[in-house]
Amino acid sequence: MTPPLVRTRFAPSPSGFLHLGNARTALFAYLYARSKNGRFVLRIEDTDQERIVPESEASILQDLKWLKLNWDEGPDVGGPLGPYRCSERYPIYERELKRLQKVARVYRCFCTNDQLDQDRKLLASQKKIIKYVGRCLNLSEEESKRRAATEQFVWRMHIPDGEPVIVHDVIRDDVKMNREVLGDFVLARVTGIPVFLFANAIDDALQEMTHVIRGEDHLSNTFRQVLIYQALGFKTPVFAHLPMIGSEEGEKLSKRAGSLSIRQLREDGFIPAGIANYLALLGWSPGDTGQTGEKFTLQELSKLFDLDRVHKGRALFDFQKLRFLNQQHLNDISSDELAQLAPPRNENFRPHWKEALELVRHDAATLDELYKIEAFLNSPEYEKSNSAREILRGGNGVKAAQALKRGLELLQKALSENLPVETALKQSIQTAGKELGLKGKELFFPFRVALTGSETGPELVPLAKVLGPQAVQERLQQALQFSQRT
């Protein structure tokens, strides 16, 4: 018999930006579906209208597409088991609620929030399990209907005594919970809008999810959802509750921490391949792949990923490792693509922008860090630089002036002979050093400061090619004048 096609889903709530925890959940669901040649589904959980943030759905879809986590079915592409937006599925929930009322004890609860709060406080003071006390459980159908005409209510599902509820989890093995702990839980409000755990279970069942991959913070919901599956005769999916992501100090990450959203990382110059690679290693290990290092493309991860290698323990967020992996993937990008991802902010730099980026890409971990080359493309301001003043006017200022003067003369001569500026500069520095008996820092630092305004920076010869012969001569002349100024 052919096993069922693997179907996974990602079901975000449009209540904010896509943050790292949710992005990792989406990634794991995507990778598992791809590793099994299955289907990855996107569903928008927008039943809680009060929490919806305008433009959030569009932002989430944009971030997922940017990460290249493309879905096979969803609100924008459709599919055979839609709709894929929960707010468009209310008739389905109403139908399933009526069906559940026929096979399980579902009743109206008229308890106010104040009553429920008082019950919780009393149970806490008595050191008892905090759950619904069942005040409305034994109302007659006649009284329930009569009160429903004038009072607000919710629908609750009664959980009778019995064997513990078992969740079969790929990561955590079998997890049990006694029924008495669960209490009679809410399914839907009087408006007909279902609560999350009910709608979520119905959608996963009717959209034929074979594997539900989500954070371990949803585990408490899963026990109640298993009871819904059983009552309605649905096949229970395979569950995989992912470990939470902790901060570098071991604390739980905040969902709304802007610095940990995919949008913020994107704005900070991280790229999809680097983020996906890092997120995959947050709570999962590839095992023996026959390769060294932890760098993997999305395609490689799609072949390697399996739920059996997801860890149980909390995964700690390591920003430096994210930067390291992002840099590894940046190094794979061609110079043409790199220039497109990080275009020049000054149009004057465009003619040699690709070559300029190559000067700094080797030690840039993000796209933003590539722009430090701009500091060297702009004309140096020697007066504002302590190192420039020390090297050009300090104890060795006379030697610096001599090196720059002779170097400039030799450079101009070489350029008049049509030598490329990078070749001309290299030869001029070497020849000036031999003639003046200078070497090491005494020789090279004046030229470095002259061209960059700093003791550190990109290699001078490639930089000279980017700057061009005119700019190189102008900078040497300005530095010479600065060194001779009293």
Image (tube, rainbow, N blue to C red):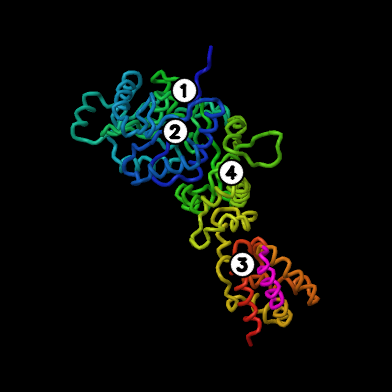
Q: Amino acid at mark 2?
A: Asn
Give the residue furthest to the top.
1
Q: Secondary structure at mark 2?
A: helix
Q: Position of residue 443 (x, y in %)?
A: 74, 73
Decide whether residue 418 is among the magenta residues.
Answer: yes
Q: Secondary structure at mark 4?
A: helix
Q: Earlier in the sequence, mark 2 or mark 1?
A: 2
Q: Residue at x 72, y 83 (%)?
A: 398
Foreground label between 1 and 3: 3
Please give the residue where the numbered disc 3 appears in the rendered image. Answer: 469
Foreground label between 4 and 2: 4
Q: Residue at x 59, y 79 (%)?
A: 383
Label at residue 236 = 1
Vertical comparison of 486 with 8: above or below: below
Label at residue 451 = none
Label at residue 278 = 4
Q: Amino acid at mark 4?
A: Tyr
Q: Is residue 179 left or right of residue 134?
A: right
Which range is magenta? Answer: 404-419
SS majority, magenta? helix
How far apart marks 2 and 3 lie (CA) works out to: 69 Å
Q: Are marks 2 and 3 in contact (CB under 8 Å)?
A: no
Foreground label between 4 and 3: 3
Q: Are marks 2 and 1 in contact (CB under 8 Å)?
A: no
Please give the residue where the numbered disc 2 appears in the rendered image. Answer: 221
